[in-house]
């Protein structure tokens, strides 16, 4: 119809949601009646709002005068069944998502019909999601998270079915839904898959129809690829961000990889993958000079392409792409000679120890390879001599007695340099997550960044 569909994450703080609705100047708000109290609190704070449409039965929220209240089904019933599709330019705005604020205030990314379409074509190619009409696709990423990772475009384009879990994203509910709805393909952040694996372990259930999983948003740990592999499910890692629609790289094998032994093949699979046709990536140093694709040099990852954003909504030049369209992603990565990008870290999360960089992602992947570790986070803790040192926080699997020393011992097998070893391993009951299911490192840093300073020198 030519309107912009702006999907909002209801789990953000009321403050953030009010900011987002006003920044976007949203005019109509669609909400589940379960959110009536939130809608009632927000409505008086959003001057552009003209109407609220409730998607189901329930007590309506009290609204200030001037804001109409509608019932979705009643509105639909009053209309003719046929839609006369309007014709407009391909650069017309179609959808709006905000970055989830993992690294600051939410910023709006406005997609066009053109960018969404080109991204969906590329993401549906054979080495990417490759949906077929026989697929049943579970969308485990919220619609507010880069348009549900564009699955709502990619799946219908191929005639595949969409399965929407709503807010029931715990492991046990997902296992039930995956089997009941005969899901063949599912996408979600790694945290959710680790939870699914736990639920499978606890219940002894099987994944009856699921064959492929796409995951990203944070690095896919080896334990997840192996765990789902035991259930006959292939994991395909993808890299992207709200600003890139989201998919830019996807991990699929090359012919030459058939010769690799299992260990070498796994090392390739843990990378974020090769760039889709229609986008470009490069890595640059502090002066902006391009770095070689040798799998060793790492630097700022930049992306450009038909579905990479040029600028944020209402933010002027802040974070805008350069004159050649290169967008600074805020990630630090290497790219190997075969073109596989490998994330070292988010530039804000990388640990700068004595001027050298340590990758929190690599250290976390090693920690979760421990059979008794459920989840792990590595953050930069202040250090009197080295400025920053890695501090490892681990959550034990339920019912397991986890000895911190046994986790620390994992770093002694030569997988990482001696000076990368975490300075301390702390057991915690749970780790905080952002609204998109990523480790909330900002919160962790607030709580733990002075931990090493508080320890007696030794
Ligand atoms: P937010 O920035 O609010 O967390 P996004 O989902 O847009 O929301 O986050 C994109 C970021 O997620 C990337 O810049 C990168 O740091 C991280 N990311 C995405 N995919 C991967 C992946 N496969 N491995 C590691 N990190 C990833």
Image: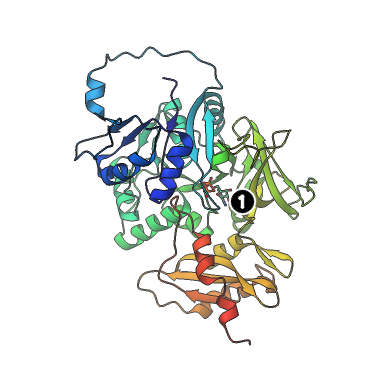
Could you tell me residue 326's position as x and y percent?
A: 70, 38
183 to 103, vertically: above or below: above
Could you tell me residue 197's position as x and y percent?
A: 39, 57
Secondary structure of the residue carrying tag 1 is loop
409 to 14, vertically: above or below: below
Whether residue 150 can be seen here? no
91 to 256, vertically: above or below: above
Could you tell me residue 35's position as x and y percent?
A: 28, 44
In the rendered image, which quarter contains the C terminus?
A: bottom right
Could you tell me residue 226's position as x and y percent?
A: 49, 57
Q: Which residue is mark 1?
A: 271
Observer-nearest of 199 and 23: 23
> Could you say which quadrant of the image residue 61 lies in?
top left
> Could you say which quadrant of the image residue 114 lies in?
top right
Observer-nearest of 340 and 241: 241
Observer-nearest of 267 and 89: 89
Residue drawn at the location 76% of the way across and 54% of the way down: 297
Residue drawn at the location 73% of the way across and 70% of the way down: 354
Horizontally, is 87 left or right of 66 in the view?
Answer: right
Horizontally, is 44 left or right of 295 in the view?
Answer: left
In the rendered image, which quarter contains the N terminus?
A: top left
Horizontally, is 343 left or right of 202 in the view?
Answer: right
Whether residue 101 can be seen here? yes
Q: Does the beta carbon at disc 1 come under 8 Å from ligand 1? A: no
Residue drawn at the location 49% of the way across and 58% of the way down: 439
């Amino acid at each position: 119809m030519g309107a912009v569909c702006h999907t909002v994450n209801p789990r953000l703080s009321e403050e953030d949601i009010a900011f987002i609705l006003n920044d976007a100047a949203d005019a109509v708000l669609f909400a589940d009646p379960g959110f009536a109290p939130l809608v009632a609190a927000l409505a008086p704070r959003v001057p552009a709002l003209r109407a609220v449409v409730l998607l189901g039965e329930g007590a309506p929220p009290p609204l200030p005068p001037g804001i109409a209240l509608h019932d979705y089904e009643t509105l639909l019933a009053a209309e003719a069944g046929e839609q006369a599709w309007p014709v407009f330019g391909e650069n017309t705005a179609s959808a709006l998502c905000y970055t989830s604020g993992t690294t600051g205030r939410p910023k709006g990314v406005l997609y066009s019909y053109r960018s969404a379409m080109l991204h969906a074509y590329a993401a549906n190619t054979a080495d990417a999601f490759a949906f077929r009409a026989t697929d049943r696709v579970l969308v485990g990423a919220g619609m507010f998270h880069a348009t549900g990772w564009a699955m709502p475009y990619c799946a219908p384009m191929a005639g595949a079915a969409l399965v929407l879990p709503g807010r029931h994203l715990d492991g046990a509910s997902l296992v039930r839904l995956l089997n009941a709805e005969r899901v063949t393909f599912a996408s979600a952040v790694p945290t959710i898959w680790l939870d699914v694996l736990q639920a499978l372990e606890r219940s002894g259930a099987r994944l009856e129809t699921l064959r492929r999983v796409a995951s990203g948003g944070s690095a896919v740990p080896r334990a997840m690829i192996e765990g789902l592999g035991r259930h006959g499910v292939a994991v395909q890692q993808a890299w992207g961000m709200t600003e890139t629609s989201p998919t830019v790289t996807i991990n699929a094998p090359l012919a030459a990889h058939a010769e690799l032994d299992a260990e070498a093949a796994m090392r390739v699979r843990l990378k974020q993958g090769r760039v889709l046709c229609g986008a470009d990536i490069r890595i640059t140093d502090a002066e902006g000079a391009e770095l070689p694709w040798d799998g060793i040099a790492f630097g700022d990852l930049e992306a450009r392409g038909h579905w990479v954003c040029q600028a944020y909504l209402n933010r002027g030049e802040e974070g805008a792409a350069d004159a050649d369209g290169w967008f600074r992603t805020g990630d630090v990565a290497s790219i190997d000679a075969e073109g596989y990008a490998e994330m070292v870290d988010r530039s804000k999360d990388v640990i700068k120890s004595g001027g050298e960089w340590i990758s929190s992602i690599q250290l976390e992947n090693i920690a979760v390879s421990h059979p008794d570790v459920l989840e792990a986070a590595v953050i930069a803790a202040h250090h009197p001599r080295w400025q920053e040192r890695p501090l490892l926080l681990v959550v034990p699997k339920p019912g397991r007695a986890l000895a911190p020393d046994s986790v620390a011992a994992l770093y002694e097998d030569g997988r990482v340099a001696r000076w990368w070893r975490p300075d301390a391993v702390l057991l915690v009951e749970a780790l905080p997550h952002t609204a998109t299911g990523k480790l909330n490192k900002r919160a962790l840093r607030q709580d733990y960044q002075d931990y090493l300073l508080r320890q007696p020198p030794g």
